[in-house]
Amino acid sequence: MHTPLPDASLNQLFFQARSRNGWEDKTVPETLIRAVYDLAKMGPTSANCSPARFVFLTTPAAKAKLKPFLSAGNVEKAMAAPYTVIIAMDMAFYEKTPQLFPHNPDAKHWFTTSPEATFDAAFRNGTLQGAYLMLAARSLGLDCGPMSGFDKAGVDAAFFAGDRETESWKSNFLCNLGYGDDHQLFPRSPRLSFEEACQIL
């Protein structure tokens, strides 16, 4: 557990991994998508609240349903990706606390002291889970293309409204999954140095 990952793994997850804009015409099996989720769900969240919800769009009908809500620059890459994931957050996530945090079922009340507390927990932990999903996908050999640039209200109305199970879900961001086309990569952008971004106190 305390042995650093080899350089090849670090390259796959971080140093050589890139945000993808283009995709190879290569099928991603559902078994792999399920494995990605089973790995991502193990990442930590506050009191194991796990507010993220993932909608994996792969069929032409599902992609067509998403298309009207994408910004112009995101249409082509989303339509070409084997999967586009709506990474959402369940604003009623606390209802599952007795299942997910059984040694303290009353922990659900930690998240319901105010609407702001509920939103903060859902957004912070749901975003973390979206990042876990991306790292899980990379670790299992897939490439990722995370995206903002879409009409959240439109996506929520089209995919979540009117369904008792999903009506409390709110979209956060999108992420394309598949096998990236190296010919459509931009040069890597610079990153901040430790001295620019960090303090040790």
Image (spheres, helix red, strand yellow):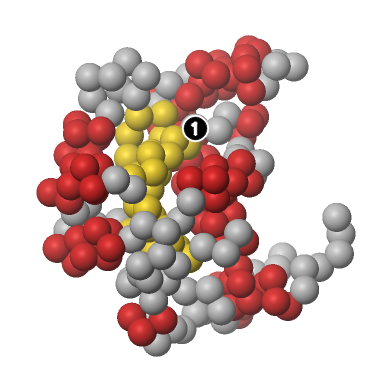
Task: Residue 64 in the image: state x and y as whole percent.
Answer: 18, 47
Nearer-the-camera pick, 129 or 182: 182
User: Percent position (x, y) of residue 129?
Assistant: 53, 45
Q: Quadrant of the N terminus?
A: bottom right
Q: Amino acid at mark 1?
A: Pro
Residue sitting nearer the eye, 198 or 63: 63
122 up-or-down from 188: above or below: above
Q: Residue at x 77, y 68 (%)?
A: 5
Instruction: Give the residue drawn at x 69%, y 71%.
Output: 9
Residue 31 vs residue 25: left or right?
A: right
Relative to 97, say whether 73 is above or below: below
Q: Around disc 1, counting alpha carbons within 10 Å, would you say few (fewer than 14), some (14 to 19), or many (20 or more)?
A: many
Q: Secondary structure at mark 1?
A: loop
Instruction: Left or right? Give the position of 179 relative to 23.
Output: right
Report the side of 9 relative to 174 (left or right): right
On the image, numbered disc 1 is attached to which residue? 51
Q: Is residue 100 visible?
A: yes
Residue 71, quarter of picture: bottom left
Q: Which quarter of the image is occupied by the C terminus?
A: bottom right
In terms of depth relative to the viewer, which is nearer, 97 or 192? 97
Where is residue 38, by image quadrant? top right
